[in-house]
Amino acid sequence: MLDTPRLSLRSWTDADLLPYTQLNADPRVMRYFPRVLSAPESRAQMSRLQAFLVAHGWGVWAVTLKSTGEFIGMTGLHAVEKDSGIPHAPLTEIAWRMLPDHWGRGYAPEAARRVMQFAFEVLALDAVHALTATVNGPSRRVMTKIGMEDTGEVFDHPALPAGHVLQRHCLYVMTRGRWEREMAG
């Protein structure tokens, strides 16, 4: 488990299934994803996330409020394979998703900073990347808030069809050196 002043990032439990399904079925949350997910898709995805955490000791965690234990979203790291079609792969991507009732409170940046600390101090990664649709202003703001640098690279996401509104993606990066400088300064 990883903690921040207000949040706990922890392994997944059966109690997370309903709010996780709601998260993935909410069109506001999934606006910058190709589509919402069904309940069976969310269940399968949650099972994969938990299995990866158990097997590797890192991955995508459930995010809960320390004060109440309420599930509010997810954040963590995802391995992007060399043959993914994503620039600079293989790479480690940071991702987050929060329930709308908890937007605008700084939870996504708070959780993401803790994940980056884990990535650099525990996993000793050289870099953490983030990618999103170029039109996804909210995630791009989080990337900037947590100190990530826009690489200026724009690419067509290989999993999306030509002409899809979300096809154009951008890439952000935080290097270990930059992280260490920010923590020292």
Image (cartoon, helix red, strand yellow):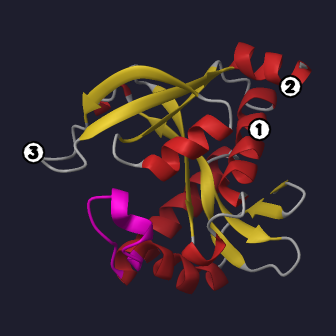
Which region shows up in magenta?
25-38
Please tell me which residue lies in front, 49 or 166: 166
Total number of numbered discs in the rendering? 3
Q: Is residue 18 above or below residue 176?
A: below
Give the mark nearest the N terminus, 3 or 1: 1
Q: Which quadrant would the C terminus be assigned to in this image?
A: top right
| Residue corresponding to mark 2 | 183
| Residue 67 counted in the magenta span | no
Please tell me which residue lies in front, 181 or 115: 181
Q: Secondary structure at mark 1?
A: helix
Amino acid identity at mark 3: Gly
- Few, some or many C-alpha atoms within 10 Å of disc 2 (few <14, some 14-19, many ≥20)? few
Assign the magenta stretch its main secondary structure.
loop
Amino acid identity at mark 1: Phe
Rounded to the nearest whole Å, what is the CA distance between mark 2 and mark 3?
41 Å
Q: Are marks 1 and 2 in contact (CB under 8 Å)?
A: no
| Residue 26 counted in the magenta span | yes
| Residue corresponding to mark 1 | 118
Residue 31: image quadrant is bottom left
